Image (spheres, rainbow, N blue to C red):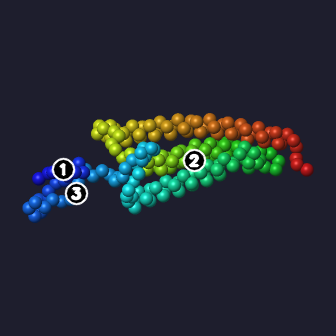
């Protein structure tokens, strides 16, 4: 026996129940229970599980952590890297490329971490209705994996070019400082 109560969702009878008794569960519950904000169009949740709460908190902490990470690497300017690369008498030729590559990798990695946590936090405001068809859902992980590999290779190339840019700036700063002569 299947009937539709006023909520619009079907409920079913469970075999073995007393005749005429119906289990009060909906076949397709509207998850998450909530409604959309009339102006912003955002989903307003009326209930939140512990797992979702932990995900929300982790997204917020991740954003804060990635901002500290980004601020730390942005403070590592060309002059600071040049001073680390130079010795008292001359420059260390191995340090400018290493510091420049490290800064470029941190810039790209920190930005991606920040964007990932921002998207994770934004997912809590998105509707939970199905977005992809069944066939698209099956191919989505393969497309995402392929795009991830392609984007990684593209961003590694961009990071290498950025590192070369910083390396040239570091070496130019060192040559300018050593041309002044010893500090007295």
- Front-most of residues 32 and 105: 32
In the rendered view, tell whether residue 171 sits above or below residue 59.
above
Marks 2/1: CA distance?
A: 52 Å
Badge 2 local density, few (<14 within 10 Å), some, or many (20+)?
many
Q: Position of residue 121 (x, y in %)?
A: 48, 50
Secondary structure of the residue carrying numbered label 2 = helix
In the rendered view, tell whether residue 50 sits above or below residue 125.
below
- Front-most of residues 117 and 156: 117
* Residue 181 appears in the rendering: yes
- Front-most of residues 91 and 171: 171
Question: Which comes sooner in the sequence, label 2 or label 1?
Answer: 1
Q: Residue furthest right?
A: 184
Question: Which comes sooner in the sequence, label 3 or label 1?
Answer: 1
Residue drawn 61% across and 49% down? 70
Residue 104 vs residue 49: left or right? right
Marks 3/2: CA distance?
A: 46 Å
Question: Which comes sooner in the sequence, label 3 or label 2?
Answer: 3
Residue drawn 48% across and 58% down? 57
Residue drawn 60% across and 46% down? 106
Q: Which mark is residue 4?
A: 1
In the rendered view, tell whether residue 7 sits above or below residue 176.
below
Q: Which residue is mark 2?
A: 110
Q: Which residue is mark 3?
A: 25
Residue drawn 88% across and 43% down? 181
Residue 58 vs residue 178: left or right? left
Secondary structure of the residue carrying numbered label 1 = loop
Q: Nearer the viewer, mark 2 or mark 1?
A: 1
Marks 3/1: CA distance?
A: 11 Å
Q: Position of residue 77 (x, y in %)?
A: 71, 45
Q: Nearer the viewer, mark 3 or mark 1?
A: 1
In the rendered view, tell whether residue 101 sits above or below residue 27.
above
- Front-most of residues 133 and 100: 133
């Amino acid at each position: 026996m299947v009937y539709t109560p006023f909520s619009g969702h079907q409920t079913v009878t469970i075999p073995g129940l007393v005749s005429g008794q119906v289990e009060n569960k909906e076949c397709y519950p509207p998850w998450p229970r909530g409604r959309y904000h009339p102006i912003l169009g955002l989903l307003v949740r009326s209930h939140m599980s512990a797992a979702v709460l932990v995900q929300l908190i982790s997204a917020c902490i991740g954003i804060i952590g990635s901002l500290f990470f980004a601020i730390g690497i942005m403070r590592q300017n060309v002059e600071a890297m040049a001073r680390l690369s130079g010795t008292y008498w001359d420059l260390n030729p191995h340090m400018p490329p290493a510091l420049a590559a490290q800064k470029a990798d941190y810039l790209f990695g920190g930005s991606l971490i920040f964007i990932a946590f921002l998207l994770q936090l934004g997912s809590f405001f998105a509707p939970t209705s199905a977005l992809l068809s069944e066939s698209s859902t099956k191919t989505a992980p393969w497309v995402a994996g392929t795009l991830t590999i392609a984007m990684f290779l593209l961003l590694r190339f961009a990071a290498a070019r950025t590192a070369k840019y910083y390396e040239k700036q570091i070496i130019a700063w060192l040559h300018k400082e050593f041309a002044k002569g010893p500090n007295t």
